[in-house]
Amino acid sequence: MARSLVIKATSGMSDGAERCNQAFTVAAAGVASGVPVSLWLTGESAWYGIPGRAKEFTLPLAAPLDELLDIVLKGGGQVTVCTQCAARREITADDLIEGIRIAGAPTFVEEITQDGAQALVY
C-alpha cells in the first residue's frame, strides 16, 4: 500500500498565497499519482471549503485553486476543515462543498500517526 500524505494548509490569499497554493498543488499531485491524500484546511484556508471561495483565489503562474481542490475531491482525496477554524469563522457543515468534512485535532493526529503517513504543513 502507498504511504498516505496528510497536508495542512494554514494560509490564504492575504497571508501566504504561495504557501496556500503549494499545499493544494501537492495535494492534487498526490491524488493524481495514486497516493492516499488528506488535505486539511486550517486558519484562513478554511474559507476554501465554502463553494465559490477557491475560485476567488488568484496567484500569477499558478494552477487555479478551485481546479486543484476539484482534483483532490474527485480523485478520492479527503478534505477537512478544522473544527476550531470553522467555529471562529462561523462556518458550519452545511456551508461546505459536498464531500468536505469538519474535524478536529484528534482526527488530524490519528491520520498523521498512521503507519507510513507523511505530514506536510504549509
Image (cartoon, rainbow, N blue to C red):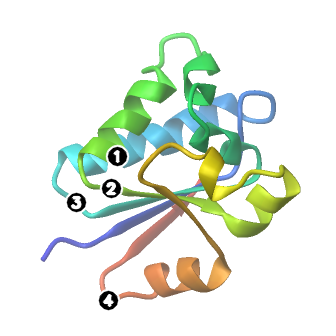
Q: Nearer the viewer, mark 1 or mark 3?
A: 1
Judge from the rendering whether residue 23 lies leftward or rightward of residue 34; answer left or right. right
Work out whether 14 lies above or below 40: above
Residue tagged 1? 73
Residue under the image location 27 percent in, 43 percent down: 74
Q: Which residue occupies the extreme right position in the image?
A: 88
- Discs 2, 1 touching: Cβ within 8 Å: yes
Q: Which residue occupies the extreme left position in the image?
A: 1
Residue tagged 4? 115
- Label 4 and label 1: CA atoms lie apart by 23 Å
Residue under the image location 61 percent in, 39 percent down: 50
Identify the mark nearer the N-term, 2 or 3: 3
- Label 4 and label 2: CA atoms lie apart by 18 Å
Whole-percent x, y for residue 100 in the image: 48, 54
Residue 77 bears which disc, if any? 2
Work out whether 54 lies above or below 35: above
- Label 1 and label 3: CA atoms lie apart by 13 Å
Instruction: Kindly identify the amino acid type of the residue bearing the numbered disc 4.
Output: Asp
Whole-percent x, y for residue 62 in the image: 47, 19
Classify mark 3: residues with Cα within 10 Å, few (<14), some (14-19) or many (20+): some
Residue tagged 3? 35
Determine whether the residue tagged by mark 3 lies in a helix, strand or loop: loop
Q: Nearer the viewer, mark 4 or mark 2?
A: 2
Identify the mark nearer the N-term, 3 or 4: 3
Whole-percent x, y for residue 118 in the image: 40, 71
